[in-house]
Amino acid sequence: NAGVTQTPKFRVLKTGQSMTLLCAQDMNHEYMYWYRQDPGMGLRLIHYSVGEGTTAKGEVPDGYNVSRLKKQNFLLGLESAAPSQTSVYFCASRPTGTRNEQYFGPGTRLTVT
Amino acid sequence: GQQLNQSPQSMFIQEGEDVSMNCTSSSIFNTWLWYKQDPGEGPVLLIALYKAGELTSNGRLTAQFGITRKDSFLNISASIPSDVGIYFCAGIPSGTYKYIFGTGTRLKVLA
């Protein structure tokens, strides 16, 4: 049971390039989340999904798109990277029901030059 | 966006000392979570709380869900060097799927 995994772990992009971050979970969780973590800002929600085929905007969605084609995977896309998107990105998942325990992946450190 | 008020921001303590930190919110929460994050790693869930007044332990860690449902506390007893890291709280306001996070307490333990 690997929990939540993220690929890649590190990436450097040039301004204007695109990329996709992959999150996978093997816990059969319905809910999945993408966050970014910046110094002094804490964790901020980018997008989230409450089930396969559904997505919703979080606090800071601009410049990002997501897809949840399979229950176990949640993809975060940057269509045209900007230096302001330099950050550490975390994926998380949680089950449905009253147990609201959210589990995080190891993170992807992205630098946009 | 909304963030939780977490204090203290940082702590330097001697090995063996006890540690206390807390989070407060202007909203009522139905869940409180406490996480620890090591450098370069993802947050790891330590304790989850679901009822006002609930007191839950995980080894040397004890957390409480405040009676008002607007605060939570984490205590670490007899600290050891591996307790070093950033601890942060998270909560879920009633009626949402979204988590609100504290800004973290950076703990350093001096041997």
Image: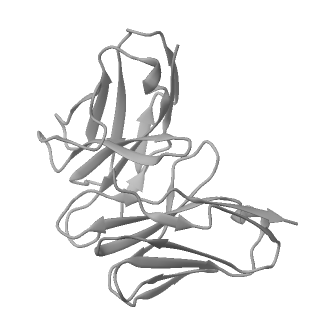
Instruction: Judge by depth and name the residue closer to the eye, B17 or A42.
Output: A42
Instruction: Note whether residue B77 is visible.
Output: yes
Query: What colour scheme was applied to this rendering of the protein?
Result: one colour
Residue B20 lies left or right of residue A51; in this view the side is right
Tell me what residue is drawn at x 29 percent, y 16 percent.
Answer: A79
Q: Residue B6's x, y, as percent?
A: 52, 66
Instruction: Note whether residue A100 is visible.
Output: no
Q: Residue B13's x, y, as percent?
A: 79, 70
Tell me what residue is drawn at x 34 percent, y 81 percent.
Answer: B69
Q: From this view, report whether residue B39 is shown above or below residue B4.
A: above
Tell me what residue is drawn at x 16 percent, y 40 percent.
Answer: A55
Q: From this view, report whether residue A59 is shown above or below residue A82.
A: below
Instruction: Give the residue furthest to the front.
Output: B26
Residue A32 lies left or right of residue B34; in this view the side is left
Q: From this view, report whether residue B65 is shown above or below residue A62.
A: below
Q: From this view, report whether residue A48 is shown above or below residue B57.
A: above
Q: Residue B34's x, y, as percent?
A: 48, 68
- Image quarter of residue A53: top left
Q: Residue B90's x, y, as percent?
A: 41, 63
